[in-house]
Amino acid sequence: MKPEADLINKVISLCKRRGFVFQSSEIYGGLKSCYDFGPLGVELKRNIAQAWWRDMVQSRSNIYGIDAGILMHPKVWKASGHLDNFSDPLVDCFNCRERFRADKAPRFAPGTLVTAQIRTKNNKSEEKTIPVGECGYVCPHCNSTNLSPERLFHGMFRTAIGSLDPLNELMENYSEGMNKDSFREFLTSHIEKSAIYLRPETAQAMFVQFLNVQQTMAAKVPFGIAQQGKSFRNEIVVEHFIFRSCEFEQMEMEFFCEPGSQLEWLEYWKQERLRWHQQFANHKDHYRFREHARDELAHYSDRCFDIEYLYPWGWDELEGIASRTDFDLKQHSQASGSKLTYFDPHKVNPETGKAGWRYTPYVVEPAAGLTRTFLCYLLDAYKEEASVDAEGGSKQRTVLKLHPTLAPIKAAIFPLVKKDGQPEMAEKIAAELRQTGLAVVYDDNQSIGKRYAKHDEVGTPYALTIDSESLRDQQVTIRDRDTTQQRRVPIAEALGVVQQLHS
Ligand code: ATP
């Protein structure tokens, strides 16, 4: 079943209310499309990242992790094609004055009639039926066909490195009387001299460090290099909260394999990645594959799939899994002069028929967004359901049914009242659990009902309550987030239930 359209607003509101995600620089009015992860958000994000790292790196013998810098030599981006091609086609709508990406706009055959909200002279809007133009798309905001031509907008953030201020150098070399064109050329040549870029993806470091990793780890093909980290894209359209932002985090792996074996590995990684996403989800049917059509494929790719998620606005990308052939290693070999190849002494060279084969490995790349995965799990976990209050009356509760592995807090420990030794006993139990490495909190704010409600909303799987009897009989009440069922059990048993979350 498709999630309700309003779900995204409910999740955004919960994120702010409960300390998952805040608008960046909020006290200054906020910075568009930039977000800060709050105390619970950072735990959830780390838990997702850790689950990926464990599954992709630590549980496999042939995948090696790295953590490369965000700034890289500008030649990396020239060789990878990003400097010349990392642009999106930008279009302005003259009707509603919004900007959009032509490649993401709704497509129609030229001449198809569409209904649009057209602005009139007195700034009102009126519904009109109009034909789609030659470009084959309309404005995604108002359906208008009154659009600017497409122009390419570069997606990388540029900055400068070095102790010299590029502006000083410009001032020194500036000569009056330059016309517009020569002035632009003058500016570009000076700025580009010291320009470096914030990485728009984490992948390139794994190609550039291919030889270092292969040699230091004596890695044998097939093997992979993985990393997680920040990426930056000057997106034209930032949308749907953290779904598309200018600063985000990725979890990528480059899997180097023998030429000819890439499509088998592509199938393997497709299944592995789908399994990974679904294992923590309540709605497994909200995930699917979408194969890229031939005309959508990058020129170097021989096949590519997206794992799509059913967001409140419909199916959209969550992760890309691409077979990238030997393009990246060849490009960097050519541009750097380093031989990014692999020698297998046990294989026969298919061209010469002789023992020993040196080749450029092919690459399969599962590329996931960490911040986008974070959003998917929140959307997947958010639930409003009927419940009963302390007096047995019916009420509505909001609960985040997060998988316990991902939950920011594994258990909340409550004293029923703030006296009679109950807080001390609750603190002691919390400390004991903390020592085993579990993220637990002690909470004595507000009524017990409100504490349950708060921890349901942040997805805490268990609540342990100490009452006046607990000191005497060493028993506590353990409440299950999903069923809301409460059981009075010996402390050791309650600790055991929570500690099972370690596995
Ligand atoms: P899209 O089509 O949504 O722009 P993409 O195909 O450009 O994404 P990739 O370059 O394949 O994305 O990046 C891999 C993953 O990184 C994406 O599947 C997504 O999860 C994440 N990602 C890419 N761009 C952004 C962004 N601006 N904000 C958040 N996550 C992003």
Image: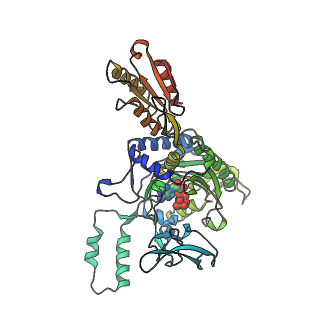
Can residue 434 be seen? no
Look at 52% across and 71% down and name the residue there.
Answer: 139
Q: Is residue 129 above or below residue 445?
A: below
Which residue is at a point 54% across and 30% down the rendered structure image? 503
Q: Quadrant of residue 433?
A: top left
Residue 330 drawn at (x, y percent): 57, 62
In this view of the protein, which residue sits in the foreground, 381 or 76? 381
Spot occupied by residue 284 in the image (x, y as percentages of width and height): 62, 45
On the picture, is 12 further left or further right than 214? Answer: left
Left or right: 339 with respect to 295? Answer: left
Note whether residue 485 is visible.
yes
Q: Position of residue 227 (x, y in %)?
A: 49, 49
Is the residue 249 above or below the residue 500 in the image? below
Question: Total marks drawn?
Answer: 0
User: Is residue 77 positioned above or below 39 on the image?
Assistant: below
Residue found at the far right of this picture = 353
Q: How is the image coloured?
A: rainbow
| Residue 79: percent from left, percent from top | 51, 65
Q: Is residue 251 above or below residue 198?
A: above
Residue toward you, 451 or 19: 451
Q: Nearer the viewer, residue 279 or 451?
A: 451
Q: Nearer the viewer, residue 437 or 219?
A: 437
Which residue, as the protein is rendered here, is positioned at the far top? 472
